Image (spheres, rainbow, N blue to C red):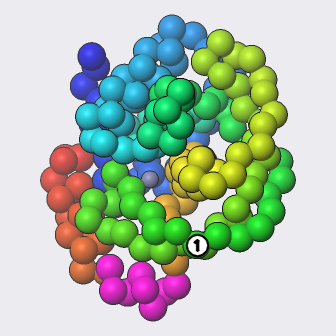
C-alpha cells in the first residue's frame, strides 16, 4: 500500500477545493481501496480524498456500519441536488482528533454521484448516511465541521485546534 496518512487540521490541503475526476483510472481505484483500508483501520465511518492529501472529488463511506448488508463504498464527483429538513447530531473527524460537537445539517439529501465503475446515480439519503455524506462532501469543498458550529463553541476548541495544527506542521516539514 502507498504511504498515505490522514492529514490533520492546519494542513492547507484540507482547505482546497477538490478537483473533479474526469477519468476513473486504476490510480483512482487504487486510491479508493487504500482509503477504505485506512478508514477501517482508524475506525472511521467516512473518509474524503483530501484527508489523505489527494485533492480530488472522491470519498468513501463504510456502509457496513450503517446497514448489515452494506459494504465500504466509494462516491466519485458527488453533488448534492436537493436537501430538506434539519437535524442536529454530534460529529467528529479523523482530521480533527479529540474534537466532537453537535452540528446542524439538512436531514435528507438527494445526491448525484458516480460509483467506482463510473456509473452515474441519483439517490436519496437520510439519517446517518445523509449526515456522513454531507460531512465528507464538505471536505471536498475545503470545509470542516468546526466551520459549522457557533464561534462561541469554536472558541472552546481553540487551544486544541492550535495543538493539532502545530503537530501537523511538524509532519509537513
Ligand atoms: Zn471529516
Residue 72 is left or right of residue 141, and the answer is left
Disc 1: residue Cβ within 8 A of ligand 1's nearest atom:
no
Residue at x-position 74% and y-position 17%: 119
Magenta region, main secondary structure:
helix
Give x and y (percent) for residue 101.
42, 73
Give x and y (percent) for residue 7.
31, 46
Residue at x-position 63% and y-position 55%: 127
Residue lying at the far front in this picture: please name it.
68
Q: Can residue 19 be seen in the rendering of this structure?
A: yes
Query: In the picture, which quadrant includes the N terminus?
Result: top left
Q: Is residue 53 above or below residue 117?
A: below
Residue 109 is left or right of residue 71, and the answer is right
Between 135 and 43, which is closer to the camera in this rendering?
43
**Which residue is the site of mark 1?**
88
Give x and y (percent) for residue 33.
42, 20
Q: Is residue 86 above or below residue 133?
A: below
Q: Can residue 60 be seen in the rendering of this structure?
A: no
Magenta stretch containing residue 49, yes or no? no
Between 99 and 170, which is closer to the camera in this rendering?
99
Residue at x-position 52% and y-position 84%: 150
Classify mark 1: helix, strand or loop: strand
Between 57 and 38, which is closer to the camera in this rendering?
38
Q: Residues within 10 Å of mark 1 (few under 14, many from 20)?
A: few
Residue at x-position 39% and y-position 29%: 35
Give x and y (percent) for residue 67.
53, 37
The residue segment tinted magenta is 150-157
Magenta stretch containing residue 153, yes or no? yes
Q: Is residue 144 above or below residue 19?
A: below
Amino acid at each position: 500500500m502507498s504511504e498515505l496518512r490522514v492529514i490533520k487540521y492546519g494542513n492547507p490541503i484540507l482547505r482546497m477545493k477538490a478537483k473533479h475526476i474526469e477519468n476513473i483510472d486504476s490510480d483512482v481505484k487504487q486510491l479508493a481501496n487504500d482509503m477504505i483500508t485506512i478508514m477501517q483501520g482508524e475506525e472511521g465511518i467516512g473518509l474524503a480524498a483530501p484527508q489523505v492529501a489527494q485533492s480530488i472529488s472522491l470519498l468513501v463511506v463504510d456502509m457496513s456500519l450503517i446497514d448489515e448488508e452494506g459494504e465500504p463504498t466509494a462516491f466519485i464527483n458527488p453533488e448534492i441536488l436537493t436537501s430538506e429538513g434539519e437535524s442536529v447530531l454530534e460529529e467528529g473527524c479523523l482530521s480533527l482528533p479529540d474534537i466532537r460537537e453537535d452540528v446542524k445539517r439538512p436531514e435528507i439529501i438527494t445526491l448525484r454521484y458516480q460509483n467506482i465503475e463510473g456509473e452515474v446515480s441519483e439517490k436519496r439519503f437520510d439519517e446517518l448516511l445523509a449526515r456522513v455524506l454531507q460531512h465528507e462532501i464538505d471536505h471536498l469543498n475545503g470545509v470542516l465541521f468546526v466551520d459549522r458550529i457557533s464561534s462561541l463553541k469554536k472558541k472552546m476548541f481553540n487551544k486544541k485546534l492550535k495543538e493539532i495544527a502545530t503537530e501537523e506542521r511538524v509532519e509537513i516539514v
